[in-house]
Amino acid sequence: MAIAVVTGSSTGIGQASAITLARAGHTVYATMRNPETGGEELRVIASKENLPLRFAALDVNSDQSVQTAFGTILEEARRIDVLVNNAGIGNMGAVEETLIDNFRAVMETNFFGALRCVQAVLPGMREQRTGCIINVTSVAGRFSAAPQAPYASSKFALEALSECLAQEMKVFCVRVAIVEPGVIATPIFGKVGQTPSSTRYPQRRRLMDMHISKEGDPYLRTLLVQGAHHILGPFGVDSDLRRWGLKLAERSGKSGKKRAIIAVARKLAILLHRLWVSGEVYEPLRNSTRITMPAAA
């Protein structure tokens, strides 16, 4: 079985990845900045299920921490077969209003942090002529929308790095892959912070309304359902947008292929996201009839 290292394992996607790999029988090193205070849920699951999961301290922003952590893992396990670069932070704001230091902080973790870890495992994977590097980027690394300039820029950069790296490592039989999650309810959203009351830009408020449900407001929990229902409606029967959407739907229906249907859904979701933050769909949805549904589990 493989020896896998997963960064940012204390919560969210990193935690789920570590558990999934360990349940499959792989030896997993779950890394986080402070294992003494983080990863409590992961420890409980690993202990209860007797999973081959070990914890290691790793701060991807520190050259010394990366060198020490991977050096210790290699000394103990003798090799690393899989690296899951998941550690990341979120930050949003208008370009005008976001400090350069905030841009740097996001790039430091999301891009340079991943790069440090990649460089730490490459010599071993190259020599053993096998391995897999998985960089967790985001759908924001495929298309960008306000007010996610800091975050999207870091994810675009990581995807560009991954594409170059995949070409370089192919000759050494090392696979490089990127994973582009969409909107997933993880603790990263709770770390974004409140929208500044002084902002001149409305996109952040709209995005927060779209992605974060407020207690006692069932409308926000069903926003995407309403969005799917209204996405073509506000533009009229003869609009170019409506004709484009209907043409895509008709094409996918005729093909009968699951992949085509998923592609259409993805394009419509991206379109809705852009129209939402731009305000073109925001007000029609906010003014529509609210639908009461049970709280999301």
Image: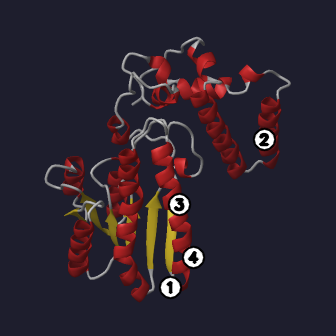
* N-terminal label among 3 and 1: 3
Q: Residue at x 59, y 28 (%)?
A: 276
| Amino acid marked by disc 3 | Glu
Residue at which label 2 appears: 248
Element at label 2: helix
Q: Are marks 2 and 4 in contact (CB under 8 Å)?
A: no
Residue at which label 1 appears: 172
Residue at which label 4 appears: 167
Q: Between residue 62 and residue 209, name the one nearer to us.
A: 62
* N-terminal label among 2 and 4: 4
Q: Is residue 257 above or below residue 227?
A: below
Residue 192: numbered disc:
none
Q: Between residue 82 and residue 138, name the one nearer to us.
A: 138
How crowded pointer 3 is (Cα within 10 Å; few <14, some 14-19, many 20+) is rated as many
Image quarter where the C terminus lies is: top left
Report whether 198 appears left or right of 34.
right
Residue 159: numbered disc:
3
